[in-house]
Amino acid sequence: MGKITLKNIKVFSYHGCLDEEGKIGSNYRVDLMVKGNLTHSAQTDSLSDTIDYVHLNKIVKEEMAIRTKLLETVADRILNRIFKELELVEKARVDVSKINPPIGGDVGMVTVSSSKSR
């Protein structure tokens, strides 16, 4: 089993329960790790035989662009799309972090982590 990791995908989006969050938006960080059998692609050297990390990044950006109240919701949507669109993925984990969340304190980020397997 091989592993592909996308670290520190930076996105500006409008997630949150507060009305202000939907208007002004904030910065987010997404980290994604997927596992699957990469043996065949290592031998063929063909993009069509592997888990395309460009496709993974596209999924993250598109799902982060859809406003949600909860980070749990967007994390779940990201995982569902990965398993729907990339059949070689056997396991995946996503961490969605809101940078400088408006929670009344000096907090660098809050992160929701979610994982899924076939």
Image: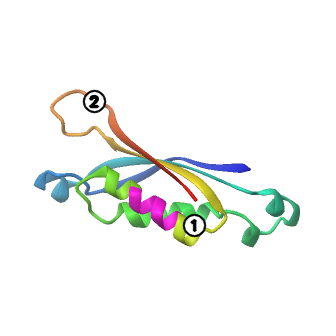
Q: Which residue has dot 2 on it?
A: 107
Q: Where does the image place residue 9, in percent across and percent down from the top left?
A: 48, 50
Give amino acid for label 2. Answer: Val
Give amino acid for label 1. Answer: His
Q: Nearer the viewer, residue 72 or 99?
A: 72
Which part of the image, by quadrant, shows the C terminus? bottom right
What is the residue that sits farthest to the front in this orientation? 118
What is the residue that sits farthest to the right in this orientation? 43
Residue drawn 74% across and 57% down? Answer: 37
Mark toward the start of the polypeptide (2 vs 1): 1
Residue drawn 33% across and 48% down? Answer: 27
**Dots 2, 1 in contact, CB < 8 A:** no
Q: Where does the image place residue 69, in percent across and percent down from the top left?
A: 22, 55
When the figure is inspected, residue 102 is found, relative to residue 67, above or below; the finding is: above
Q: CA distance from mark 2 to mark 1?
A: 32 Å
> Could you tell whether 25 is left or right of 57 in the image?
left
Q: Is residue 40 visible?
A: yes
> Could you tell whether 28 is left or right of 38 in the image?
left
Residue 77 got which mark? none
Q: Main secondary structure of the magenta part?
A: helix
The quadrant holding residue 107 is: top left
When the figure is inspected, residue 32 is found, relative to residue 100, above or below; the finding is: below
Residue 55 got which mark? 1
The tally of labels here is 2
Residue drawn 73% across and 72% down? Answer: 48
Q: Where does the image place residue 59, in percent across and percent down from the top left?
A: 48, 65
Residues drawn in magenta = 76-82
SS of the residue under disc 1:
helix
SS of the residue under disc 2:
loop
Residue neighbourhood size for the residue with mark 2, other residues' Cα within 10 Å, grouped as few (<14), some (14–19), many (≥20):
few
Q: Where does the image place residue 90, in percent across and percent down from the top left?
A: 63, 57
Residue 81 covered by magenta stretch: yes
